Structure formats: structure tokens, C-alpha cells
Amino acid sequence: MIETDSTGTRIMFMRKKNGLNQAEVCKAGGFHKASYSNWENNRRTPSLIDAKKLEPILNTSASYLLKLTDTPEILGMNKDGTFVTPCPSIPILSDGLLNESTEQEQRYMPFPSFINKDISNYFAYILKDDSMSPDFSVKDIIVLNDKTPIEHNKFILAKLNNSNSLIFRKIYIDNSDAKNTLYKLIPSNKEWPLITIENIKLISIHGVMDNKRKIHI
């Protein structure tokens, strides 16, 4: 069985499946040979823009290549000969605001179209610190839903009302005292402080993570 547990092996697998060599992929996508080689050898991960460029070349979705899904959705072809776009896009949140990059493509990331749900409430966030390591790393991209209700032991993206910074934490809801519910924002990295809140209204919840799927750039 082909090992497809990394972005590099997925790119290599789909290239070979489509009967292409590295030079042909580089020519079709306008990639530098060294950069592409680094992707297949897991020394680097393609940017979101480059992953989208690989879609029609490798006949699969950027979401599969970047490990957002385990299903290598096969593209169809439009009547005009162009490839069907397999992934709608979701916005990338940056400290409470959409990334203000002048490149429209960099403000969004691909999201697999075969997921049978409304994606209008989903967004992505790029982690800025190591507070959740080893579970999550700096620059990991996480996908959250701004309509999913918070639950005990869920991962949330939130902002304290007295701060302008977003924090990504696991929320622990402590109901041991019937008269006073405590909300604990727990980092995976023990070097970061535990935050305890007595009133949930003291934080703004931006989104809840449906699962622990992530990608690293």
C-alpha cells in the first residue's frame, strides 16, 4: 500500500498516478525544480497558492495534498477543457480580521467540496505561538466553525475582552461547584499559563474546532 501520511508522499503518489515526472509537473505549474523536489522529500510544504496550482496537474484537490482530507477527490473537466475546481475556499482569519494581503488568493484556503455540510461558517487560522505544542505547532493551519457551540474539552479560538490577541486553547468546563461554573482555557504547553474565567461573557468565542485536523506550512 502506498504511504500517504505526508504532503510529500501524497504529491509523489498523485504525480506517479498521473504518469508524470517531476520536470513535467514543474513545467506545467511554473515551479522551480529545487522547490518541487523539496515538497516531495518533505523538506518543505507548498504554499496554499502552489497547492491550488497543483490541482489540475495532479488531478486531485489541494485539500488532499495538504492533508485536510484523506479522500483524493478526482477532478472532472468542464466542456471548455478546463478542470473543475474541486475546492471552494474559506477565509483565513488573522488576529480577528481577514488577512489584509493584496493577493486575493492568500486570503483564502481550499476546503474540500465533497464534505456534505454548509461551509459558510468555516474559517482557517494560522497559529502564531507554541502554546498548544506538542499537539499543534507554530504555523499550523486549523479549521474552525463560528457556529459550533462550545463544549467541554473542545478546542476554541477566543479573545479575552481585555486583550486584542486571539488565543487557541482547549476549554475545560468545571461544574464541580453547582453555584459557580468555571471555564478553564488550557494550553498543551505547560510553560504557558492556565486561564480561568468565572463568566463566559468575559471572552469572545471566534470559533470551535470540529476535529483536530491541521496542516503545517
Image: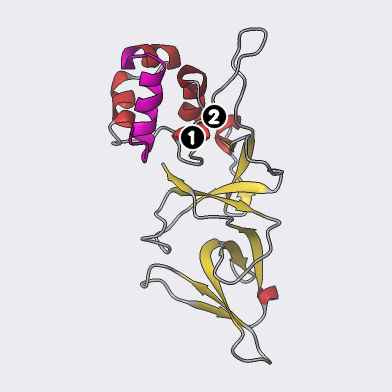
- Residue found at the very far top of the displayed protein: 80
Residue 164 visible in the picture: no
Q: Residue 209 carries which label?
A: none
Give the mark nearer the N terminus: 2 vs 1: 1
- Region of the chain picked out in magenta, as a range: 1-23
Of 138 and 154, the residue lying toward us: 154
Of 73 and 86, the residue lying toward us: 73
Type of the residue with mark 1? Tyr
Asked if the residue at tag 1 contacts the one at tag 2, i.e. Cβ–Cβ closer than 8 Å, the answer is yes
Which residue is located at x 30 percent, y 36 percent? 42
Of 78 and 168, the residue lying toward us: 78
Which residue is located at x 36 percent, y 26 percent? 13
Residue 31 screen position, x and y as percent: 38, 19
Q: Is residue 182 magenta?
A: no
Q: Considering the numbered disc 2 on the image, is that residue within a helix, a strand or a loop?
A: loop
Residue picked out by circle 1: 64
Q: Is residue 157 left or right of residue 201?
A: left
Residue picked out by circle 2: 73
Q: Residues within 10 Å of mark 2 (few under 14, many from 20)?
A: some
Q: Is residue 2 magenta?
A: yes
Q: Considering the numbered disc 1 on the image, is that residue within a helix, a strand or a loop?
A: helix
Residue 65 screen position, x and y as percent: 45, 33
The Cα atoms of the two marked residues, 2 and 1, are separated by 7 Å
